Amino acid sequence: MTNKGNVKRVFPGNNTPMGFFSYYDHILPKDATRVFVIKGGPGVGKSTFMTNIARDMVDLGYDVEIHHCSSDNNSVDGVVFPAIGVGLVDGTEPHVVDPKVPGAVDEIIWLGEFWDEDSVRANKPQILQCQKGIESVFKRAYRYLKAAQVVYEDWESVNMEAMDYGKANMIAARVIEETMGSVPVASSPGTERKLFASAITPDGMVNYLNTIVAPCKNRYVIQGEPGTGKSVLLEKVKRAAVERGFFVEAYYCPLHPEKVEHVVVPGLSLVLTKSIHPHTYVPGPTDTIIDMDQCLDQTVIESHRDCLELAQKAFASLFETAINYISKAKQYHDALERYYAPNMDFASIDRLRKKTLDRILGYASEVRGAAGTGDSD
């Protein structure tokens, strides 16, 4: 019996204070074996199409990356089969994706081919109204996320005032020495892949950290209050790994998309993960815990206790309001799907899914054949 493949769950895009923020260019490299770009309206079965193919590939023993949708974490925006360099991605708004190397690498699968156009057109006014509602509430959500970000920065500023940066620098240097001190700087630097491990969704902050962290043998859990240098430490480790020629997966913060939250170096089976509300990771018995709060001057913290408490309360309120608006956007989207789904020929889509799965398995055979030829040289 074939062993099932492993599943890793990530987010390629996010709801952020900057609006929808996309790392879709990092789902697959430009020289991938094949990228299927799935197009079609809401409710036409794009997520189900990809999810069912992913399920079949896992059952056949292939490792799979599931790329979840930040606006509906129960939906899927992409699936990737890393061993064969093949993936499927949702190419519709707000993360429009078009073929970059048409035919040679990418192709479009158009599910609009399977809808009853007359029935869909009959609902045009309602569809336009739902789209207007989605746009409106997302704008409100992003305003509140922006306000929450500003308050969070005020929260950070108190802790930054209390920080001993010399101690923080020494901690970072020690981690780099422990994890890659024996590895020299490479003549050619490594590469970085950018994604999100957590997302701001209609259900609040959601993460699948365990699927990213658990496979690594060497795990560092970075704890500490906002502003205590956790992201700075991770940035230094990431840079050191790239300088030494390693491929690095870096996962960024939804509230600050320029800040790294988690770093994975597969070549070292190494992961460093921030654990802080609302994206916590429960350390295991063999994990190394680094508490950056040790760098804080508690006298300074206590002198600004009222500021901290006010910022924490305001942030929680603003963040919750943003989540409520994102949830309302999903309600509009669910209503929108109801104008498409009843008018779809899902039996034909399922036949297309099976043909697409056969094509993917054909690419897998080609990759295995090429690897076998390379081994015999």
Image (tube, rainbow, N blue to C red):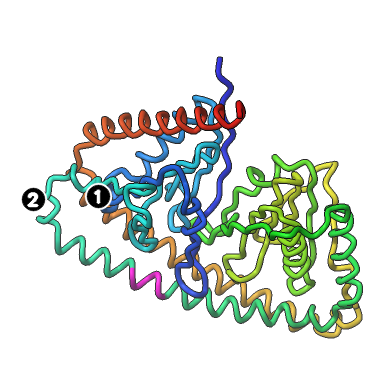
Q: Secondary structure at mark 2?
A: helix
Q: Position of residue 113 (x, y in %)?
A: 18, 45
Query: In front of the other: label 1 or label 2?
Result: 2
Magenta: main secondary structure: helix
Please give the name of the residue rendered at 9% of the width and 55% of the height, measured from the top-left corner.
Answer: 122
Disc on res. 114: none
Which image quarter: residue 1? top right
Can residue 25 be seen by looking at this rendering? yes
- Side (left or right) of 37 relative to 128: right
Question: What secondary structure is found at the residue carrying circle 1?
Answer: loop
**Is residue 92 found left or right of 170 in the rendered image?**
left
Q: What quarter of the picture does the C terminus occupy?
A: top right
Q: Does the magenta run of residues contain 136?
A: yes
Q: Earlier in the sequence, mark 1 or mark 2?
A: 2
* 277 vs 109, nearest the viewer: 109
> What range of the chain is rendered magenta?
135-139
Question: What amino acid is labelled 2 in the image?
Answer: Asp
Q: Residues within 10 Å of mark 2 (few under 14, many from 20)?
A: few
Instruction: Identify which amino acid the numbered label 1 is placed on.
Output: Arg
Is residue 25 shown in magenta? Answer: no
The reply, left or right, for residue 23 in relation to residue 108 is right
Taking the image as shown, residue 16 lies to the left or right of residue 298, namely: left
The residue drawn where x is 46% and y is 27% is 365
* Cα–Cα span, label 1 and label 2: 15 Å
Q: Which residue is mark 1?
A: 338
Query: In the image, what residue occupies the spot 55% across and 28% down?
Result: 373
Residue drawn at point x = 50 percent, y = 52 percent: 29
Q: Which residue is mark 2?
A: 118
Image coordinates of residue 196 in percent, x first then y, are 57, 58
